[in-house]
Image (tube, rainbow, N blue to C red):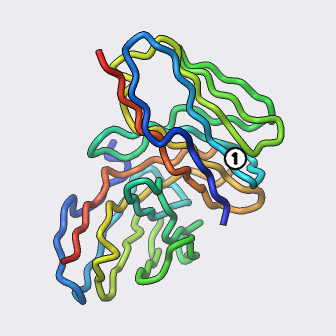
Protein backbone atom coordinates (compact mmCIF):
# COMPACT_ATOMS: atom_id res chain seq x y z
CA UNK A 1 0.00 0.00 0.00
CA UNK A 2 1.34 3.40 -0.98
CA UNK A 3 0.82 5.86 1.86
CA UNK A 4 0.63 9.62 1.51
CA UNK A 5 0.95 11.65 4.70
CA UNK A 6 -0.15 15.27 4.70
CA UNK A 7 0.88 17.93 7.19
CA UNK A 8 -0.45 19.77 8.95
CA UNK A 9 -3.76 17.96 9.44
CA UNK A 10 -5.47 21.21 10.49
CA UNK A 11 -4.43 24.80 9.77
CA UNK A 12 -6.22 27.99 10.76
CA UNK A 13 -4.71 31.32 9.75
CA UNK A 14 -5.68 34.95 9.24
CA UNK A 15 -6.66 36.33 5.85
CA UNK A 16 -3.61 37.69 4.02
CA UNK A 17 -1.09 35.27 5.51
CA UNK A 18 0.93 32.74 3.54
CA UNK A 19 0.90 28.99 4.16
CA UNK A 20 2.39 25.73 2.93
CA UNK A 21 0.88 22.25 3.02
CA UNK A 22 3.06 19.17 2.61
CA UNK A 23 2.40 15.75 1.12
CA UNK A 24 5.02 13.06 1.78
CA UNK A 25 5.48 9.42 0.92
CA UNK A 26 8.17 6.75 0.85
CA UNK A 27 6.81 5.62 -2.53
CA UNK A 28 7.56 7.02 -5.97
CA UNK A 29 4.63 8.22 -8.06
CA UNK A 30 4.24 8.75 -11.80
CA UNK A 31 2.14 11.84 -11.13
CA UNK A 32 0.66 13.70 -8.24
CA UNK A 33 -2.59 15.60 -8.08
CA UNK A 34 -4.06 18.11 -5.64
CA UNK A 35 -7.80 18.27 -5.01
CA UNK A 36 -9.93 20.63 -2.93
CA UNK A 37 -13.12 19.48 -1.23
CA UNK A 38 -15.88 21.64 0.21
CA UNK A 39 -18.48 20.43 2.75
CA UNK A 40 -21.10 18.14 1.24
CA UNK A 41 -19.27 17.89 -2.08
CA UNK A 42 -16.80 15.57 -3.74
CA UNK A 43 -13.17 16.60 -4.31
CA UNK A 44 -12.38 18.77 -7.34
CA UNK A 45 -9.05 18.67 -9.16
CA UNK A 46 -6.78 21.72 -8.81
CA UNK A 47 -3.60 20.57 -10.58
CA UNK A 48 -1.57 17.59 -11.84
CA UNK A 49 2.25 17.50 -11.71
CA UNK A 50 4.13 14.80 -13.58
CA UNK A 51 7.84 15.71 -13.73
CA UNK A 52 10.25 15.59 -10.78
CA UNK A 53 10.96 19.16 -9.67
CA UNK A 54 8.00 20.55 -11.60
CA UNK A 55 6.41 23.76 -10.33
CA UNK A 56 2.93 24.87 -11.38
CA UNK A 57 1.16 28.08 -10.45
CA UNK A 58 -2.58 28.62 -10.29
CA UNK A 59 -3.14 32.28 -9.37
CA UNK A 60 -2.07 32.48 -5.69
CA UNK A 61 -1.45 28.73 -5.40
CA UNK A 62 1.96 27.22 -6.18
CA UNK A 63 2.40 23.45 -6.45
CA UNK A 64 5.73 21.64 -6.49
CA UNK A 65 6.58 17.99 -7.18
CA UNK A 66 9.69 16.77 -5.38
CA UNK A 67 12.77 15.86 -7.41
CA UNK A 68 12.47 12.22 -6.34
CA UNK A 69 8.71 12.18 -7.12
CA UNK A 70 7.91 11.11 -3.55
CA UNK A 71 6.60 14.39 -2.15
CA UNK A 72 4.78 17.57 -3.05
CA UNK A 73 3.89 20.91 -1.54
CA UNK A 74 1.12 23.44 -1.95
CA UNK A 75 1.91 27.07 -1.12
CA UNK A 76 -0.84 29.69 -0.89
CA UNK A 77 0.08 33.37 -0.95
CA UNK A 78 -2.14 35.98 0.71
CA UNK A 79 -4.80 33.47 1.77
CA UNK A 80 -8.44 34.45 1.37
CA UNK A 81 -11.60 33.09 3.04
CA UNK A 82 -12.52 31.45 -0.26
CA UNK A 83 -9.46 29.20 0.12
CA UNK A 84 -11.11 27.46 3.08
CA UNK A 85 -11.60 23.75 2.49
CA UNK A 86 -10.09 20.28 2.70
CA UNK A 87 -6.98 19.88 0.52
CA UNK A 88 -6.08 16.38 -0.63
CA UNK A 89 -3.01 15.19 -2.48
CA UNK A 90 -3.29 12.02 -4.57
CA UNK A 91 -0.57 9.96 -6.22
CA UNK A 92 -0.76 7.60 -9.17
CA UNK A 93 1.64 4.69 -9.35
CA UNK A 94 3.54 3.32 -12.33
CA UNK A 95 1.80 0.70 -14.40
CA UNK A 96 -1.37 0.65 -12.32
CA UNK A 97 -4.63 2.49 -12.36
CA UNK A 98 -5.02 3.24 -8.67
CA UNK A 99 -5.11 6.78 -7.32
CA UNK A 100 -3.95 6.88 -3.69
CA UNK A 101 -5.14 9.82 -1.60
CA UNK A 102 -3.37 11.55 1.24
CA UNK A 103 -4.77 12.05 4.73
CA UNK A 104 -5.94 15.60 3.99
CA UNK A 105 -5.32 19.10 5.36
CA UNK A 106 -8.31 21.06 6.61
CA UNK A 107 -7.62 24.74 6.00
CA UNK A 108 -9.60 27.58 7.58
CA UNK A 109 -8.95 31.19 6.62
CA UNK A 110 -10.24 33.68 9.18
CA UNK A 111 -11.49 37.00 7.76
CA UNK B 1 -24.10 17.62 -17.87
CA UNK B 2 -24.91 15.39 -14.91
CA UNK B 3 -21.33 14.11 -14.51
CA UNK B 4 -21.19 11.50 -11.72
CA UNK B 5 -24.48 10.84 -9.94
CA UNK B 6 -24.69 8.97 -6.64
CA UNK B 7 -27.84 7.79 -4.92
CA UNK B 8 -28.96 7.92 -2.19
CA UNK B 9 -27.36 10.97 -0.55
CA UNK B 10 -28.14 9.73 2.96
CA UNK B 11 -28.91 6.27 4.32
CA UNK B 12 -29.34 4.70 7.75
CA UNK B 13 -29.02 0.92 7.99
CA UNK B 14 -29.35 -1.56 10.82
CA UNK B 15 -26.49 -3.96 11.44
CA UNK B 16 -26.82 -6.96 9.15
CA UNK B 17 -28.95 -5.25 6.50
CA UNK B 18 -27.84 -5.15 2.90
CA UNK B 19 -28.02 -2.33 0.40
CA UNK B 20 -26.64 -1.06 -2.88
CA UNK B 21 -25.12 2.36 -3.40
CA UNK B 22 -25.72 3.49 -6.96
CA UNK B 23 -23.22 5.36 -9.16
CA UNK B 24 -23.76 6.45 -12.75
CA UNK B 25 -21.66 8.62 -15.06
CA UNK B 26 -22.60 10.10 -18.43
CA UNK B 27 -19.08 11.04 -19.63
CA UNK B 28 -18.25 7.68 -21.27
CA UNK B 29 -15.37 7.21 -18.82
CA UNK B 30 -13.70 3.81 -18.75
CA UNK B 31 -12.26 4.04 -15.25
CA UNK B 32 -14.52 4.12 -12.18
CA UNK B 33 -13.80 3.69 -8.50
CA UNK B 34 -15.34 3.72 -5.04
CA UNK B 35 -13.76 5.40 -2.01
CA UNK B 36 -14.76 5.79 1.59
CA UNK B 37 -13.87 8.91 3.55
CA UNK B 38 -13.37 8.83 7.31
CA UNK B 39 -12.11 11.67 9.55
CA UNK B 40 -8.32 12.03 9.45
CA UNK B 41 -7.88 9.30 6.84
CA UNK B 42 -8.45 11.01 3.51
CA UNK B 43 -10.10 8.78 0.89
CA UNK B 44 -9.42 5.06 0.86
CA UNK B 45 -9.97 3.00 -2.28
CA UNK B 46 -12.52 0.18 -1.93
CA UNK B 47 -12.88 -1.23 -5.47
CA UNK B 48 -12.18 0.02 -8.95
CA UNK B 49 -12.92 -0.89 -12.57
CA UNK B 50 -10.96 -0.20 -15.74
CA UNK B 51 -13.89 -1.03 -18.01
CA UNK B 52 -17.14 -2.98 -18.34
CA UNK B 53 -16.73 -6.49 -17.02
CA UNK B 54 -13.45 -5.77 -15.21
CA UNK B 55 -13.18 -5.00 -11.49
CA UNK B 56 -10.41 -5.20 -8.91
CA UNK B 57 -9.89 -4.64 -5.20
CA UNK B 58 -8.53 -1.50 -3.61
CA UNK B 59 -7.02 -1.19 -0.15
CA UNK B 60 -10.20 -1.74 1.92
CA UNK B 61 -12.42 -4.20 -0.07
CA UNK B 62 -13.70 -6.42 2.75
CA UNK B 63 -17.48 -6.29 3.20
CA UNK B 64 -18.11 -4.75 -0.22
CA UNK B 65 -18.90 -6.16 -3.65
CA UNK B 66 -18.99 -4.46 -7.03
CA UNK B 67 -19.87 -5.28 -10.62
CA UNK B 68 -19.55 -3.38 -13.91
CA UNK B 69 -22.02 -4.61 -16.48
CA UNK B 70 -22.11 -1.30 -18.40
CA UNK B 71 -19.70 1.59 -18.94
CA UNK B 72 -22.12 3.98 -17.20
CA UNK B 73 -22.93 2.17 -13.94
CA UNK B 74 -20.78 0.95 -11.05
CA UNK B 75 -22.89 -0.08 -8.03
CA UNK B 76 -21.36 -0.85 -4.62
CA UNK B 77 -23.05 -3.56 -2.54
CA UNK B 78 -22.89 -3.97 1.22
CA UNK B 79 -23.93 -7.57 1.89
CA UNK B 80 -24.23 -7.38 5.70
CA UNK B 81 -23.74 -3.88 7.06
CA UNK B 82 -21.56 -3.34 10.12
CA UNK B 83 -21.07 -0.20 12.28
CA UNK B 84 -17.47 -0.02 10.98
CA UNK B 85 -18.93 0.75 7.54
CA UNK B 86 -20.38 4.04 8.77
CA UNK B 87 -18.69 6.52 6.47
CA UNK B 88 -19.11 8.85 3.52
CA UNK B 89 -18.81 7.00 0.23
CA UNK B 90 -17.63 8.62 -3.00
CA UNK B 91 -17.79 7.29 -6.52
CA UNK B 92 -15.34 8.68 -9.08
CA UNK B 93 -14.74 8.29 -12.79
CA UNK B 94 -11.96 9.31 -15.16
CA UNK B 95 -11.44 9.15 -18.91
CA UNK B 96 -8.22 7.23 -18.51
CA UNK B 97 -6.00 5.93 -15.77
CA UNK B 98 -2.97 7.60 -17.29
CA UNK B 99 -0.76 10.02 -15.41
CA UNK B 100 -2.90 13.04 -16.29
CA UNK B 101 -6.24 11.37 -15.63
CA UNK B 102 -8.55 13.69 -13.68
CA UNK B 103 -10.97 11.99 -11.29
CA UNK B 104 -14.51 13.39 -11.29
CA UNK B 105 -16.43 12.73 -8.09
CA UNK B 106 -20.06 12.40 -7.18
CA UNK B 107 -21.50 14.29 -4.22
CA UNK B 108 -21.20 11.33 -1.89
CA UNK B 109 -23.46 9.04 0.12
CA UNK B 110 -23.44 9.47 3.89
CA UNK B 111 -24.10 6.04 5.39
CA UNK B 112 -24.80 5.35 9.06
CA UNK B 113 -24.98 1.78 10.35
CA UNK B 114 -26.62 1.42 13.77
| Numbered circles on residues, count | 1
Q: In which quarter of the image is residue A15?
A: top left
Q: In which quarter of the image is residue A52?
A: top right
Element under disc 1: loop
For the N terminus of chain B, the quadrant is top left
**Residue A73, horizontal then vertical, whole percent:** 64, 32
Residue in the image at 66% along x and 67% along y = A1
**Residue A56, horizontal then vertical, whole percent:** 66, 23
Q: Disc 1: which chain?
A: B
Please say if A31 is above or below B47. above
Using residue B11 as the reference point, say whether residue B84 is left or right of it: right
**Residue A2, horizontal then vertical, whole percent:** 67, 60
Please say if B18 is above or below B2. below
Residue in the image at 72% along x and 34% along y = A65
**Residue A83, horizontal then vertical, whole percent:** 40, 24
Please say if B59 is above or below A51. below
Q: Quadrant of residue B75?
A: bottom left
Residue in the image at 28% along x and 60% along y = B109
For the C terminus of chain B, the quadrant is bottom left
Please say if A98 is above or below B104. below
Comparing A22 with A87, the one in front is A22
Give the residue pinned by disc 1: B99
Other-residue count near label 1 (Cα within 10 Å), few / some / many at <14 / 14–19 / ≥20: many
Residue in the image at 39% along x and 67% along y = B73
Amino acid sequence: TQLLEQSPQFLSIQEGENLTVYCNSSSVFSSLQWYRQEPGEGPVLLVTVVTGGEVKKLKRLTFQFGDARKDSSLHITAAQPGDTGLYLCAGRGFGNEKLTFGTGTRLTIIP
Amino acid sequence: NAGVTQTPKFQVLKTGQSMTLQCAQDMNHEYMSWYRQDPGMGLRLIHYSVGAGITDQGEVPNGYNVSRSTTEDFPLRLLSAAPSQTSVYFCASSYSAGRMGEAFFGQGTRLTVV
